[in-house]
Image: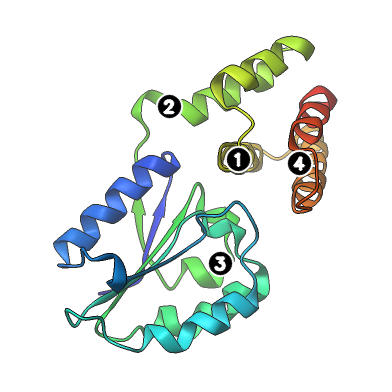
């Protein structure tokens, strides 16, 4: 099967579609699925290089899946390390990448995948929350974030990725400045000892 890129919608919807694709391929057992990207952190080249040899080994039912949810967390060097695999995947391997917007990946990655658009329900919860938050002011923005998103790591990264994709749709001077602040916040969040709430609150108020 071709390498598949699921884009659009929200993370949960993309996971549901990925599960359906695997079911259609007869891949249902956990030990036949290699899954990376569930943790809210960057995916580096060393992690990819460690996994690559295992992908060429058939699963117990002769099939195997390689899933990368929130693939925009792949570093550029990690993405480059995947190019050959995506272009010529083993016949037993199903590869699925999931991303809010394909523009968050290198064009060379996107061009090697079969793109499947995931439709959001009435703008999607995350997409709608992004717009509401960006339109809100000061303290109201903080209240909306706590109510609609929350401060757990997975929710924070999913939200920031959605904001990033939204801002890139219509780049101008203001959105470019917001993106720079967002990227800085992401860098700070990589520190395991970082105060996530403080970083996010400062980011939201700076917009």
List the residue tagged with mark 3.
Answer: 107
Residue 121 position, x and y percent, is 34, 28
Q: Secondary structure at mark 2?
A: helix
Q: Secondary structure at mark 1?
A: helix
Q: Quadrant of the C terminus?
A: top right
List the residue tagged with mark 4.
Answer: 182
Of tags 2 and 4, the one toward the viewer is: 4
Between disc 1 and disc 3, whose residue precedes? 3
Between disc 2 and disc 4, whose residue precedes? 2
Between disc 3 and disc 4, whose residue precedes? 3
Q: Quadrant of the N terminus?
A: bottom left
Q: Are marks 2 and 3 in contact (CB under 8 Å)?
A: no
Between disc 1 and disc 4, whose residue precedes? 1
Gap between marks 1 and 4, in whole Å?
15 Å
Q: Residue at x 50, y 55 (%)?
A: 38
List the residue tagged with mark 1.
Answer: 169
Q: Residue at x 51, y 23 (%)?
A: 128
Q: Residues within 10 Å of mark 2 (few under 14, many from 20)?
A: few
């Amino acid at each position: 099967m071709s390498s598949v890129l699921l884009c659009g919608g929200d993370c949960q919807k993309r996971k549901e579609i990925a599960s359906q694709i695997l079911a259609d391929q007869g891949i249902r057992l956990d030990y036949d699925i290699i899954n990376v990207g569930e943790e809210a952190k960057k995916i580096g080249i060393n992690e990819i290089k460690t996994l690559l040899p295992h992908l060429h080994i058939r699963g117990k039912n002769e099939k195997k899946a390689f899933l990368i949810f929130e693939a925009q967390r792949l570093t550029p060097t990690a993405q480059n390390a995947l190019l050959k695999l995506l272009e010529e995947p083993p016949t037993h391997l199903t590869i699925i990448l999931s991303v809010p917007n394909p523009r968050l990946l290198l064009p060379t990655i996107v061009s090697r995948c079969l793109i499947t658009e995931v439709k959001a329900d009435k703008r999607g919860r995350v997409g709608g929350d992004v717009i509401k938050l960006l339109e809100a002011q000061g303290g109201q923005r903080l209240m909306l974030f706590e109510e609609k998103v929350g401060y757990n790591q997975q929710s924070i990264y999913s939200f920031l990725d959605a904001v990033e994709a939204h801002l890139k749709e219509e780049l101008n001077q203001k959105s470019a400045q917001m993106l720079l602040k967002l990227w800085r916040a992401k860098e700070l969040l990589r520190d395991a000892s970082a105060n996530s709430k403080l970083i996010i609150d400062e980011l939201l108020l700076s917009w």
